[in-house]
Image (spheres, coloured by chain):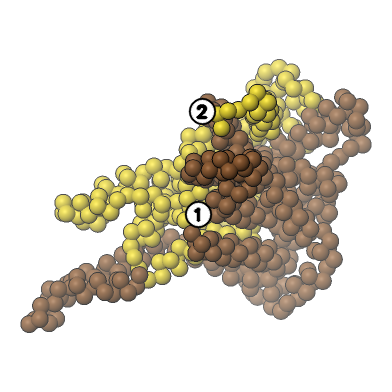
Amino acid sequence: MAAELTRKDPERAPAPAGAPAGPRAAAARRAARLRALRPWLLLAPALAVLAVLLFWPLVRVLLLSFQDYGLRQINTGESNYIGLGNYREILGDSFLWRTVLPNTVLFAVVCVLATVVVGTLVALLLQRLGRVWRIICSSVVMMAWAMPAVTGTYVWVWIFDPLNGVVSGGLDGLGAIEPRETNWFTDRWSFYAIAALNVVHHGFPFVAITVYAALLTIPRELPEAALMDGANAWQRFWNVTVPTIRPVFLVVTILSTIWDFKVFAQIYLMPGGAGSNPEVLNLGVWSYIQSFSRNQYGMGSAIAVLLTLLLLGITVAYVRALSNERDHL
Amino acid sequence: MNRTSTAGRLWLGVAVAALLCFTLFPVYWMVSSAFDPGADHRGSAVLPSGFTLDHFRYVFDTGEFGQYLVNSALVGVGTVLLSGALALFAAIAVARFQFRLRTKVLVMILVVQMVPLEALVIPLFLQMRSLELLNSLLGLTIVYLAFSLPFAIWTLRGFVATVPKEVEEAAYLDGCGWWRMFSSVLLPLVAPGLVATSIFAFIVAWNEFVFAFVFMQDDSKYTAAVGLHRFFGQYSTDWGAVMAGSTLITLPVLVFFVLVQRRLAGGLAAGAIR
């Protein structure tokens, strides 16, 4: 690209052989410089915003993670470096390994698997439906997508409310549980099962719509040829559909992974999720509570850095896998 | 696929029914509880026990929810205007010009999109605090601008790239300058893309919780998502009212989503793959 640009420039600046550095040549050179500058002028405001509001805070959170940063430091603006102290404390704590990390990683893995499977099934379903039902179903799927995380969480909490919620009411009616003795939000597993339901309900529409769009790009001849060869539906899906739209699967999987790793509101807004029940903390909420409830901003930053590193690893894998994919195609 | 047997049709019907139930049930439960006079003791009654607007009235009168909705709308509109303008310029730069570092800039924007925003709460809180923008709608707007920008640039890039270069060149031949070409040729042609990204930016701002929760300390500055939370704690879970507030927050998003559903999906897929 760069070579192309430099090759073109001399042609555009017409320098007559007899008159070097004439006023026309200078003007042309200035125009060329302006042309080279123009994309940067257009990019400048956006890049400035990203630098100040995303890049610099990212550097800052790293710096903070090496400090014991509390209320005093906030008010005076001093720094207070303690080296790797925060990391040593976090990584040496069994709370991270037994509770927070499993809550984050296991939850994300389960949610991603469920989201991609449900989304793909819905996409395959959409493909088989007639026009009217397809429009109905895709609009309804959009409604699930549209529900904000905050209100969605409240609705699921209300649905599973131990005293007056629909689920406990129904199970009570069947005589299966005693509502006053059941609270699904105190137990870690049932807490996260409800959170997973919430996250999958909110996340599968993106997968469904994207995979459905990809399914439409598969040439008709492919599955038909497989059908001729006697492949059944299961084989056709795994041997024709999946390889053809592999990049799309990759994208939706990685994006879902990133989203599910950093869920915050969906956990924080559930009963006990805001710190009163330490059993259910994940990395995001733990970082928040360390900083804003306990005023240990350095510790909170160190946790945030760990979360970022985790996601960075996933992003690198994503970019790599995508560029490999491009080499193949 | 036209030779579907009766059993196949039956399965299809069951699948559609399951999908509709799973997808719609929370929406139905939210809306019906919001209008149910006996919402708090509803239990598993599938139909609401009656119809009332009391919960909505209560939310507006006692909970100052009107103010919260206005705050959310202001922040949303501010985010849309700013991010639309900045993203369009940036998108033109990366879609129309060949320059050094172009690919690097694009990859950087993609990677920046992956940064967990939750990790930036602490530094941004400190930054906004020292700029004295903490308790202000402007501060929140600026932060949301940064969040919606990367996605908007990627999406708009696709829209700008689909405008044929010849159209631009024709405008130049007619004697237009760059600015004239931009405003009367390029802008109208990418308007649909601008609408789609605007709606996305609005929804990001409208739904965001963590930053609004941390930044806004004064009741009157709460956005709707945060206002609902306060409301929740203060009145020891008045479910009818919480569901009424939730309905009010969800409705505009629902309308927007249905309006742009096709474009949004296409844009997301295109932005993520290319």
Q: Which mark is residue A66?
A: none
Mark 2 and mark 1: Cα distance apart in space: 27 Å
- Is residue B146 placed above or below A226 in the rendered structure? below
Residue A193 seen in this snapshot: yes
Q: Quadrant of the N terminus of chain B?
A: top right
User: B262 or A245: which is nearer to us?
Assistant: A245
Q: Residue A20, how many percent across, how many down?
A: 12, 82
Residue at the location (61% across, 35% down)? A125
Q: Amino acid at mark 1?
A: Ile
Amino acid under label 2?
A: Arg
Disc 2 crowd rating (10 Å Cα; few below 14, some 14-19, many 20+) is few
Q: Residue at x 24, y 73 (%)?
A: A9
Q: Disc 1 is attached to a residue of which chain?
A: B
The residue pinned by badge 2 equals A131
Residue B6 in the image: state x and y as whole percent. 65, 23
**Residue A261 placement, left or right of A167:** left
Q: What residue does disc 1 label?
A: B273
Question: Which of the pair A283/B238 is nearer the observer?
Answer: A283
Q: Residue at x 41, y 52 (%)?
A: B158
Q: Which chain is yellow?
A: B
Give the residue furthest to the front. A229
Please report, as a chain letter, where disc 2 is located.
Answer: A
Q: Is A154 rendered above or below residue B108?
A: above
Q: Which secondary structure lies at badge 2? A: helix
